[in-house]
Amino acid sequence: MDLKDIKAILDLMKKNSVSEFELEKQDFKIRLKRGINGGLVPGAGEDSPALVYAPPLAVAAAVPTTLPVSEVSNDIEIKSPMIGTFYRSPSPESASYAEVGSEVNPDTVVCIIEAMKVMNEIKAEVKGVITQALVENAKTVEFGEPLFKVRPT
């Protein structure tokens, strides 16, 4: 893993409000933690060979990616029916099809997945309220990968 990959992971952590990331492959292990004001985060002692790094981040008002959920969740996952590139809106200038807090019906289009230059509209197939958006815009998704979580109504 090179520095470019680590920076990409840090960007994803920032965009998705993830405070800790850990990856272990064969004899390689990396653990990244973000602090509120950046800087190193305590937690990797001498017994831990992990790299701990926390880039400085500005606190920004952002659209929430989750709604509060109870301890027991009945949320249903909207899963990708194919491999392709996930898009939240029909064009970069357009508003997203669905946001956290949006009410959806079975026929509501929630996103587009591009596969082999074909844009495929993905419908909710359930009635409820979106509680989580699980995939970042313009990222590749796999078959069966959860895209959204919906609280049925």
Image (cartoon, rainbow, N blue to C red):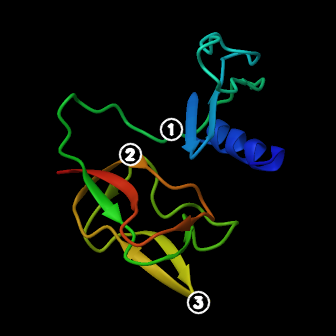
- In space, the residues marked 2 and 1 are separated at their CA atoms by 9 Å
Q: Amino acid at mark 2?
A: Gly
Residue 38, image x and y in percent?
74, 19
Query: Answer yes or no: do the residues labelled 2 and 1 have beta carbons within 8 Å?
Result: yes
Residue 3, image x and y in percent?
82, 44
Between residue 116 and residue 121, name the one nearer to us: 116
Q: Which mark is residue 116?
A: 3
Q: Is residue 30 left or right of residue 8?
A: left
The residue singled out by tag 1 in the image is 64
Q: Which mark is residue 101?
A: 2
Relative to 89, residue 77 above or below: above
Residue 33, image x and y in percent?
63, 25
- In space, the residues marked 1 and 3 are separated at their CA atoms by 31 Å
Q: Is residue 71 left or right of residue 3?
A: left
Residue 57, image x and y in percent?
74, 26
Q: Residue at x 25, y 70 (%)?
A: 125
Q: Amino acid at mark 3?
A: Met
Between residue 17 and residue 21, name the one nearer to us: 21
